[in-house]
Image (spheres, grey):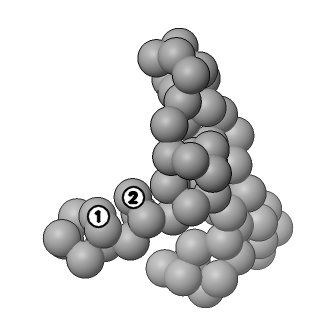
Amino acid sequence: MTNAANESFFASLKRESFPEDGCFDTKAEARRTIFDYLEVFYNDKRRHSSLGNVSPETFLNQHFRTQKTHLN
């Protein structure tokens, strides 16, 4: 990942999941919030420009709908 991509990702993470004051009350809250952001939202729901501005979930659904099934 390039530096620009890293900076963009972390800016999105902070903007979309951190508390307004930028501080979590506990380390456990921070871990839970960041995990939820990554695993529930970012990886499945958030639109990605590298996928044509669709979510990974939508991209995979479109991909598998257009692929022929091959049974070996």
Left or right of 41 on screen, residue 3: left
Q: Say which of 67 and 52 sits in front.
A: 52
Q: Are marks 1 and 2 in contact (CB under 8 Å)?
A: yes
- Seen in the picture, residue 3 relative to 38 is either above or below; the reply is below
Report the number of numbered marks. Answer: 2
On the image, numbered disc 2 is attached to which residue? 10
On the image, numbered disc 1 is attached to which residue? 6
Residue 28 screen position, x and y as percent: 53, 13
* Amino acid type assigned to the residue bearing label 2 in the image: Phe
- Seen in the picture, residue 5 relative to 49 is either above or below; the reply is above
Residue 30 screen position, x and y as percent: 52, 27
Please tell me which residue is depicted at 22% across the width and 64% down the height of the picture.
1
Please tell me which residue is depicted at 51% across the width and 64% down the height of the picture.
12
Quarter placement of the C terminus? top right
* Amino acid type assigned to the residue bearing label 1 in the image: Asn
Cα separation between marks 1 and 2: 6 Å
Residue 45 visible in the snapshot: yes
